[in-house]
Amino acid sequence: MIDAPTVSLQLDSTAGEYQPGQRLSGHFLAEGAVPWPVRSAELSILWYTAGQGEEDFAVHYFERLVDEPGRPLDLRLPRRFAATLPPSPLSYDGRIVKVCWCVRLRVFPQQGPELLREKAFRLGNVPPPMPE
Amino acid sequence: MQLVKGRNQLPTQEPPSRYANPFATCWTRPGAMAFRFPRGKSAERLVAELAASDWQGEIIGPHGSGKSTLLDTLIPHFVAAGRSVALVTLHDGQRRLPARWLDKSLASSRPLVIIDGWEQLTWLSRRIVRRRCCRASAGLLVTSHAATGLPLLFRTQPTRELVDELVSALTARIPSPITESDVAASHACRGSNLRELLFLLYDRHEQLSAAGRAAAQTTLSRTA
């Protein structure tokens, strides 16, 4: 059995702050000398709410990479992604509810558990609430 | 450190994320957090006990004490035991089951009807459900705040030890500035209502984190 390698997910902008309509881009790759057989990988750019009570989410961008018969995916080559961000909802760091944006990568290896990587980013400039 | 171009001039924080608070619903809702059985009890054992009582039973406990979380943990075991599970969760004021829900549930093979929030139903609805399940030889498992007349399967009674165990598990993944005295105060305030207790800890975490950020900004302003 091959151990799961380190999978990195990077955004091109190091600031992690974007404005509506701006293009978000980045890449992901598996590090390691040995190929790591992967069935599929899913990359999504999404927002969700977190906090107390009901939760909501929506996927803004989705991309799925799948293996071919006899040819498992080799993620050692960097895979690039890019999408234009929508006008809303803007990121918000409230006390009761937070609106969170992230790039989420799910990797499904041929063997072993699913691997999840997330990179949070901020959309817009809504300031956080003032402390009480 | 950068400053937000906003009116309050707080230091730029990490982007908002579910990883900001270990007590957010996404980490504490039924399904996200596994039910913690007391010593001598397990999911397998409860399934065996329910089978022994002809798949009739009740889970009793106060509001927010973990009844739904227990159900969520047990359901895969019921399915593994060959039961067709039909679950409905009733909320405040829901006095009847959804239309045709019971018909559909009883039409499946070896049905196990699970009603979360049994006390919401009217007396007549409860009687009809029990009679119909009995006629169809279906299992019936309910959660309630008080005894229903069905065999008792489990009583949820969160203890201070359980609260400590849950808080430790949640904060092991996502660190929190809350202290032992915060946990003790929340437990003293909410007692066996785990849901409300975790809400209090969520608020306390937010309060302490915001105070920490404000203190960091004050230090930054003084040094600038």
Image (cartoon, coloured by chain):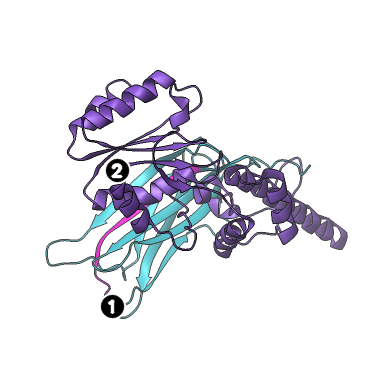
Chain colours: A cyan, B purple
Q: How many marks?
A: 2
Host chain of mark 1: A
User: Camera-side residue: B170 or B136?
Assistant: B136
What's the residue at 59%, 47% (across, down)? B194
Q: Secondary structure at mark 2?
A: loop
Q: Which residue is mark 1?
A: A2
Residue A122: in magenta span:
no
What's the residue at 59%, 63% (across, down)? B168
The N terminus of chain B - image quarter: bottom right
Q: Quadrant of residue A26?
A: bottom left
Could you tell me if the residues under marks 1 and 2 are in contact, i.e. CB atoms within 8 Å?
A: no
Instruction: Have a look at marks 1 and 2 and say if they share a chain.
Output: no
Q: Is residue B3 visible?
A: no
Q: Disc 1 marks which amino acid?
A: Ile
Label 1 to label 2: alpha-carbon separation: 44 Å
Q: Is residue B121 left or right of residue B15?
A: left
Q: Position of residue A102 (x, y in %)?
A: 48, 50
- Which span of residues is magenta-colored? A34-48
Q: Secondary structure at mark 1?
A: loop
User: Camera-side residue: A53 or B95?
Assistant: B95
Crowd around label 1: few <14 · some 14–19 · many ≥20 (10 Å): few
Q: Disc 2 marks which amino acid?
A: Trp
Q: Nearer the viewer, mark 1 or mark 2?
A: 2
Q: Position of residue B200 (x, y in %)?
A: 67, 45
